[in-house]
Amino acid sequence: MGTDGRSTPRGGHARLGELCLRLTGPSGSLLLGERGLRLVEFITSELRTGRHPNELDDVFDELEEELLAAGHSAGLGSYRTTPTPPTPGFQPLPGAGHRHTTLHVLACPQGHCERVEAPDADSPPPGCRIFDQPLRPVPLR
């Protein structure tokens, strides 16, 4: 699988991961016109019926154009303008030192995108608005 900005070498679809992350943001949706919202709905319904994200790259292209036209300067590419959070000094891994034998992260419930989040013991796992499921735990090796 190539690395053309659409997919990562790991097999996760980069733009799907960015769409999923944006849909779970504070507003819960993207500020889009009717056409853009229809594209998001189409992508979501196609993925839920089992279509692979790489088969929808043309639709992701259209959605990206809608995002850019609506003023989302990064489109679906977080690599463009989303600033990298500052890296604090050394931080222990979540769960390390608390007698937890297995560390894990939370990832796409279907394994289609590259979204990964650290678990929070004080709240339920975040959800995936694309597949309408919670993110699944993936053990770190």
Image: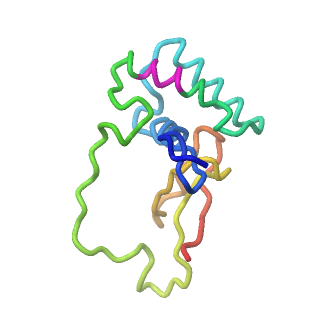
Above or below, 60 against 17 in this view is above
Q: Is residue 133 left or right of residue 49?
A: left
Pick out the residue farthest to the right. Answer: 49
**Residue displayed at 51% across by 23% down:** 63
Above or below, 19 against 141 in this view is above
Q: Which residue is at the front of the view, 22 or 16?
A: 16
Occupied quadrant, residue 51: top right
**Residue displayed at 31% across by 41% down:** 82
Residue span colored magenta: 61-67
Residue 115, percent from left and from top: 51, 51
Occupied quadrant, residue 87: bottom left
Q: Is residue 66 rendered magenta in the image?
A: yes
Q: Number of callouts in the render?
A: 0
**Residue displayed at 36% across by 32% down:** 74
Pick out the residue farthest to the top. Answer: 34
The quarter of the rendered structure image containing the C terminus is: bottom right
Q: Is residue 82 rendered magenta in the image?
A: no
Residue 4, percent from left and from top: 50, 41
Residue 120, percent from left and from top: 46, 63
**Residue displayed at 55% across by 85% down:** 101
Q: Provide the major secondary structure of the magenta segment.
A: helix
Above or below, 5 against 141 in this view is above
Q: Is residue 48 left or right of residue 108?
A: right
Q: Which residue is at the front of the view, 124 or 94?
A: 94
Q: Is residue 115 left or right of residue 78?
A: right
Residue 99, percent from left and from top: 49, 87
Question: What scheme was used to colour the molecule?
Answer: rainbow
